[in-house]
Image (tube, rainbow, N blue to C red):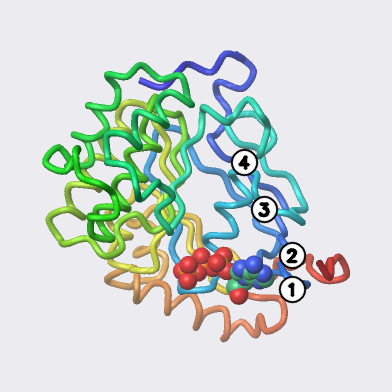
Amino acid sequence: MPTPDPDPRTAVTPAIDAAGLTVVRGGRTVLHDLTFTVPRGSVTGLLGPSGCGKTTLMRALTGVQAHVQGTLTVLGRPAGHASLRTRLGYVTQAPSVYTDLTVRENLDYFAALLRVPKNDVDRVIHEVDLDAHAKDRVSHLSGGQRARVSLAAALLGTPELLVLDEPTVGLDPVLRRDLWDLFHRLAADGVTLLVSSHVMDEADRCQRLLLLRDGRLLADETPASLRETTGAADAESAFLALIEAGADAGAGAEGPEGATRAGGEADPR
Ligand SMILES: Nc1ncnc2c1ncn2[C@@H]1O[C@H](COP(=O)(O)OP(=O)(O)OP(=O)(O)O)[C@@H](O)[C@H]1O
C-alpha cells in the first residue's frame, strides 16, 4: 500500500494537476497550454502518435524537464519537489539499469538507495515475472526483459504515482496482458498510474485517457465517453474523428481546443 499523504490538505487533491502547462524544447513549443487532472488510484493512458509530446509531459511531471511554464502539481507538491523522490516511480523508454549486474543485484542496489526493505526485491521480481531470471546478468536479457527490470526498480517501495513511458513496447501479448493486470491491481491498492503508449488499442485497458496530438490535448475522458462523444467504435477511430472535428471547426493555428498560449518564450538553449 502507498504511504498515506502526510498532509491532510493535499490528501484529497488529484495525483496530477496541470494548468496552462507549456514546454519549450530546442526553441520550439512542444506542449501547448495543457490543463488536466489525473485522479488518484486510477490507470490513466497517455496516448498519441510518436512525437506528440508524451515523454516531454512525463519528464515535466518527474521534474527533469527544463523550460516548463504554467502550474504542475504532483501529489500535492510542485513537480520536481525533493519530497516526491520516493513517492513517484518513473520508467523511461530506455531501460536504466546496470547491464553488468544481475537482475537481483540491480534491485538490491536500488532498494538500498531508496532504503526499501530487501525483501521487497523478491516481490517486485515476481510482479514483473522475472523469477526465472533473477540471477541472470542484465546484458544477457532481451529488450523486453530489461524493460521489466526497470519497471521492477520503479515498483520498489510501492510509490504513490507510477509514470511509465511505453512499458509494454516489444512485449508478447501474454506479458502485455499480465502487465496491464498488474497496473490495475496496483491502482486498486490506491496507486496512480500514468502509462504512455502510441498504440491506440491499449486505450480500452485504461480507466481514463489523455489524448495528445502535436503537443495539444485532444481529449481527457474515459474510453467509453470518448466512444460516445465521437460515435466511434474504437479509440483509433475516435482519435481520427477528433482530429477531423478540429479541422472542420477551422481550428487551424489554434488547434482543436483553441487552447494555445505558445510563442515568445523560446529559450535557444
Ligand atoms: N532534446 C530535445 N530537444 C528538442 N526537441 C526535442 C527533444 N526531445 C524531443 N524533442 C521534440 O519534442 C517533441 C515531443 O517529443 P516527445 O519525445 O515528448 O514525443 P513522444 O510523444 O514521447 O514520442 P515517442 O512516442 O516517439 O516517444 C517532438 O517534436 C520532438 O522532436
Q: Which residue is mark 1?
A: 28
Q: Which residue is mark 3?
A: 65
> x, y percentage for residue 20?
73, 53
> x, y percentage for residue 179?
23, 47
Whether residue 100 sits left or right of residue 259 in the image: it is left
Disc nearest the viewer among 2 and 3: 3
| Alpha carbon separation for disc pair 4 and 3 | 17 Å
Q: Secondary structure at mark 4?
A: strand
Residue 135 visible, this orientation: yes
Between 164 and 237, the residue placed more toward the observer is 164
Disc nearest the viewer among 4 and 3: 3
State yes or no: discs 2 and 4 in contact (Cβ < 8 Å).
no
Q: Secondary structure at mark 1?
A: strand
Going from N to C along the chain, the mark reached first, 1 or 4, is 4
| Alpha carbon separation for disc pair 1 and 4 | 24 Å
State yes or no: discs 2 and 3 in contact (Cβ < 8 Å).
no
- The residue lying at 39 percent from left, 62 percent from top is 197
